[in-house]
Amino acid sequence: MSTATAAPKIVTAAVLVIGNEILSGRTKDANLNYIATGLTEIGVRLMEARVVPDIEVRIVAAVNELRAAYDHVFTTGGIGPTHDDITSECVAKAFGVKLIKDPKAAALLLTHYGEANLTEARLRMAHVPEGAELIDNPVSIAPGFRMGNVYVMAGVPAICQAMFDGIKGGLARGDKVLSKTVSGYIGEGVIAKDLGALQQRYPALDIGSYPFFRQGKFGASFVIRGTDEEAIGKAAAELRAIIRTLGADPIEGEPVA
Amino acid sequence: MSTATAAPKIVTAAVLVIGNEILSGRTKDANLNYIATGLTEIGVRLMEARVVPDIEVRIVAAVNELRAAYDHVFTTGGIGPTHDDITSECVAKAFGVKLIKDPKAAALLLTHYGEANLTEARLRMAHVPEGAELIDNPVSIAPGFRMGNVYVMAGVPAICQAMFDGIKGGLARGDKVLSKTVSGYIGEGVIAKDLGALQQRYPALDIGSYPFFRQGKFGASFVIRGTDEEAIGKAAAELRAIIRTLGADPIEGEPVA
């Protein structure tokens, strides 16, 4: 269908959300979508996300499964000073290394808190797996760290997002997944057959259909994703024609709410 | 510490969110927190959540891992009429059964759409794994289904949540995990040592610490969770005393924003 092109360079990632509070419903995760959006922007494909409780064996297993399966792993949560913050120990165990006090992290905390307020608990936040590199925390100083391909970040959204922004620029990345959205006030069940045929004509693209209900009417947004901009443009043109043939007006992007 | 009591009855669950749109960042998941909160209310412990893309091998593997590990599994997404809706086929494959047209589901769709509008694509939504039971969809008719311990629900939040509300009452459940929250404008690093000691004195409880920044001040909410209401009350009283000893006022619940 489209002219032969080189296979896209694919770099993958997973997110591991660590925290009982997400699983109990107390807290709504606010980091996954931020990280997902940021990774898509730079050409990293988020292939999986997991939420696990503050249980050592579960965290260690998840870290080891995900770091073996994906190029990058981003963890959120569990690096504060309290007893329920066990992520750093767990990552050390997952890598089979010791947890050590990082002198640079300890110095940062000493400067920030002063000697009188640098409690033993706060000094826990200077401990990282042996061989880790610090991740800058511009919000509240206590750093995250990178160990191998695992990036360990805080759970508090403002801190997590600042840490992620700091490391994003340095991440290995692949070809960007571009996307084009065309919408229409048309039932998914009406367009499904033609949409499926369009997907078959463009096997290298990924066409998703997302229904909505707006202004009292059902419709759907169709998202065409892939690395070949020209092919996306062609598929979008065909999609607009399909929508028109079925009696609706194609809308570029998402309809205005 | 506390008097010996019978081991709590524990019933576990996992949530499997299926959809490229969550992983690309296009869509923010809005179902996990709803399901998590509902499960906590009725005495089911959500122990894991995963997000996987619309890829058959990934969905089948996740369904099989999760249904083996937990009492209940709730999936969201991928049961609409378009080509990217592959959850039902994947669940059938995971269970090693055929995907069949359910006569009751087909009749519901026929009544809803009428014969002229019941496209082949819409009829796809009447297909379920052999042996499945339908889950009612009061919003848009096309049903979800239960297969073994796997509850397959729509991804559209209004539909997912209505389906979940419908099945919640009939779920096997364990002892409720009760919780009490006490907060204080106190640094986590200041209270951490005493909080850790409190956790050690109440090993059957689960004490979490969640920092916040409000009204220009740092503080934290401490959540005590467990099945023994009396023990929770005692631990909360000790916690209030700790907060006072450290010079702050204990606040019941979360502080008003």
Image: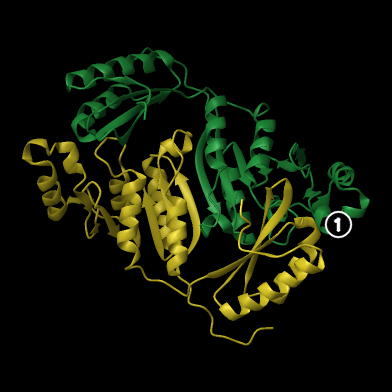
Chain colours: A green, B yellow
Please provide percent x and percent y for residue A126.
81, 49
Q: Is residue B75 left or right of residue B242?
A: left
Of residues B64 and B197, which is closer to you in this image?
B197
Identify the image quadrant of residue A210. top left
| Crowd class of label 1 (few under 14; some 14 to 19; many from 20; radius 10 Å) | some
Horizontally, residue A206 falls left or right of residue A58, namely left
Q: Determine whether B140 is above or below B130 in the image.
A: above
Question: Which sits in the foreground, A73 or A126?
Answer: A126
Q: Residue at x 43, y 15 (%)?
A: A229
Residue B243 seen: yes
- Chain name for mark 1: A
Q: Quadrant of residue A133?
A: top right
**Most foreground residue, A174 or A249:** A249
Residue at 28% x, 46% y: name it. B89
Residue located 81% across and 54% down the image: A122
Q: Is residue A96 left or right of residue A49?
A: right
Give the x, y percent position of residue B136: 24, 56
* Residue B242 x/y as whole percent: 77, 69
In front of the other: A236 or B256: B256
Of all residues, the one furthest to the bottom in this rendering is B3
Residue B65 seen in the figure: no
Give x and y (percent) for residue A124: 80, 54
Please tell me which residue is depicted at 81% across the width and 64% down the height of the picture.
B246
Q: SS for tag 1?
A: loop
Q: Is residue A93 above or below residue A3?
A: below
Direction right: furthest residue: A115
Circle 1 residue: A119
The N terminus of chain A lies in which quarter of the figure? Answer: top left
Identify which amino acid the numbered label 1 is placed on.
Answer: Thr
Query: The C terminus of chain A lies in which quarter of the figure?
Result: top left
